[in-house]
Structures are given as structure tokens and as C-alpha cells.
Image (tube, rainbow, N blue to C red):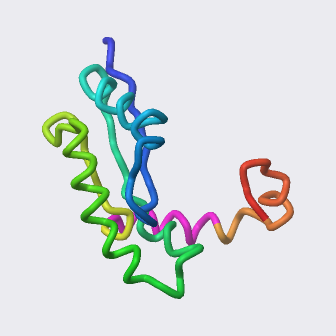
Amino acid sequence: MNHPQTILTGDRPTGQLHLGHYVGSLRQRVALQHNHQQFILIADLQGLTDNGSNPQKISHHILEVMADYLAVGIDTRLTTICLQSALPALAELSALYMNIVTVARVERNPTVKK
């Protein structure tokens, strides 16, 4: 059986999406949604990591990011869009990972910023 590939992507709602977002990923998301199972995460909790003192900023931009997705052609009949804070399983997984992944291991990960 041939199943479509699954794509998980997303954005932190820390500001308005712009031309760089469109060229860098949004237009590819529009194209890929027709042949892949696509999930887009609006990563509001992750956005709080460097905006914790201003959570209203994140709340404000959630709807703007969603509107931008729809405006560029993301079709909610083809793509699942979800809000990170609305998925309790993500918080549960985070709690588990925090108990089994050491700080040393995280520090060896080249994608983690200091």
C-alpha cells in the first residue's frame, strides 16, 4: 500500500508573517498539501520562550498567522492547522522528555541555541 508522506511544519506567532516566510516555506506548503498529509502547528507555547514577558503579543498574532495561512492558499480541507497549546499530548511528551533527556545531551545538539 502506498501512503502519502506526512509533513509537520509550523510557525511561532511572534509577529506578522512576511515575504520571507512566503518564499521560504509558505508557497511550498500550499503545493505540498495536495500530495501529502500535512499538519501545520501554530507554536504559541514555543513563542513564549522569548516573549514570556508579553504573552498578549503571542495571543494577538495567532489570528494574524492563521489569516495569513488562509490568504496564501492553505486549504483546511487538505491541511490540518492546530494550536500547540490546544494539544495536551505535547505537554505530556515534554514532561516525559524533560525527565529522560539530560542537559549534556541537549547541549550537544547543534540546533539548540544558547
Instruction: Confirm whether the magenta stretch covers residue 88.
Output: yes
Q: How far across and down, in percent of the image, does residue 46 sit?
A: 51, 66
Rendered view: 5 above or below 64 = above
Q: Start and end of the magenta stretch?
A: 87-97
Residue 27 is inside the magenta segment: no
Q: Residue at x 74, y 59 (%)?
A: 113
Q: Nearer the viewer, residue 14 or 40?
A: 14
Residue under the point 32% across and 25% down: 36
| Residue at (53, 82) in percent of width and height | 52
In the image, residue 10 sits, relative to residue 62, either above or below, namely above
Looking at the picture, does residue 50 appear above or below residue 65? below
**Residue 55: image location, x then y, percent:** 43, 82
The answer to whether 80 appears left or right of 7 in the picture is left
For the C terminus, the quadrant is bottom right
Viewer-proximal residue, 68 or 35?
Answer: 68
Q: Would residue 21 be found to the left or right of residue 33 on screen?
A: right
Q: Percent from the top left, x then y, of residue 7?
A: 41, 34
Q: Residue furthest bottom?
A: 53
Among the 4 quarters of the image, the one containing residue 23: top left
Left or right for 53, reference 109: left
Where does residue 75 sit, x and y in percent of width and height?
A: 17, 37
Q: Residue at x 20, y 44 (%)?
A: 71
> How many labels were placed on the picture?
0
Instruction: Tell me the quadrant of the picture where the N terminus can be found.
Output: top left
Residue placed furthest toward the front: 19
